[in-house]
Image (cartoon, rainbow, N blue to C red):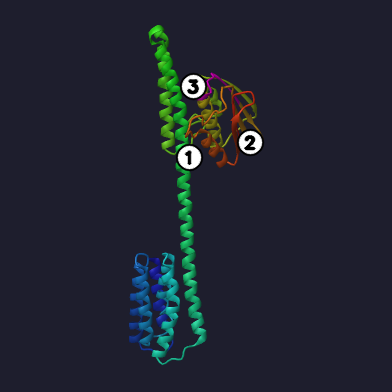
Amino acid sequence: MALLIVVAALVVGGVQAADGGVSAADRLAGAAVLLAATAALHWRRRRPAVVLAVTAAAAVSYYLLGYPLGPEPVPFVVALYATAEAGRRSIAVTAVPLAVGLVLAADVAAGRAPEGEDLVAVTAVLVAAVGLGELARSRREQRHAHAERAVAQERLRIARDLHDTLAHQLTAISVQAGAALCKRDSRPELAYPTLETVREVAGDALREVRSVLGVIRADATAGGNSCDAVPAIGARAGLAVTMTVSGEAGALPPDVDAATYRIAQEALTNVRRHAGVTEAEVRLAYLPRHVEIEVLDRGGGTAGSGDRTPGGHGIAGMRERVTALGGRFSAGPRPGGGFRVWATIPR
């Protein structure tokens, strides 16, 4: 609406300010023709080609009827810009030579001699309108593509968080439930504490899943995703975790803290699921510009604490997390047996 008001003001002001000894009635009639073309601009986004034709017809009619020259191209130029912006490139480009041809034809029909300078100026304005429309369309498409990439990245992050959370918690629940079943007949008094642990782990899983689905980034206070909680991860999964911390922790950015926690969680979960051992070692180093985490086990086989089954996503997910934060990641067998997961992330 604001654009229509500006164009209307330009055409009315141009008609009134133009020279040529035209009567007030002719000025009023000329303004009415151009205002009708301006009103058509309201549909420039929905029907750009139609609006372009209407404004062109209005400009030619205005010219042939001998109304004051000057403002007649304004609605057409705006329509030409809108056509290019709408992605109708072929129509917009074709309209430029056609418009110049119409100007020449109108001059001949009106008995006027075409002026080369005027034709050059008209051509330059029309080409500029098409170019600016193309530029606006290109920028809009770039913004749209950027928004789509951001959505895709957020979906990937949520999927990764869900995988990390559910893989760990469900493994812990499975281990504890299996222990409770083994004890229910021989030592029933020991089965109940184990079932209580299952209940707590399930509650933790629900809270973390709600956090992920709510697109809330886990941090040390809200989601418990702090490196200080790493030993508890192993305990819930039935692992004895030896943790070594070096350097001054300080305050880690939430993304870095969450990524470090998730890496430890995923690696320890897969130690319990695939390594065939009940012990693991975690080394956490707070360096001046990086935080470094290493998860080690002495399990059998050559596959490691990550994707030990076909189609697994553990190592890929950890690598994506670290790479997204500008860090480095590696995972592979250790000399003499076992597996090593290592990552360093800028603080």
Q: Which residues are magenta?
A: 272-282
Residue at screen point 45% across, 46% down: 151
Disc 1 element: helix
Residue position marked by numbered label 3 in the rendering: 237
Three-letter amino acid code at the position of disc 2: His
How packed mark 1 is, by other alpha carbons closer than 10 Å (few <14, some 14-19, many 20 or more), is: some
* Placement of 217 over or under 305, stated as above or below: below
Q: Residue 218: give its label.
A: none
Three-letter amino acid code at the position of disc 1: Arg
- Residue 21 visible in the displayed image: no
Label 3 vs label 1: CA separation?
A: 24 Å
In the image: residue 124, left or right of residue 8 = right
- Please name which of the two marks, 2 or 1, marks the residue nearer to the observer: 1
In the image: residue 29, left or right of residue 130 = left
Nearer to the camera, 88 or 112: 88
Residue position marked by numbered label 2 in the rendering: 290
Q: Position of residue 341 (x, y in %)?
A: 58, 30
First in sequence: mark 2 vs mark 3: 3
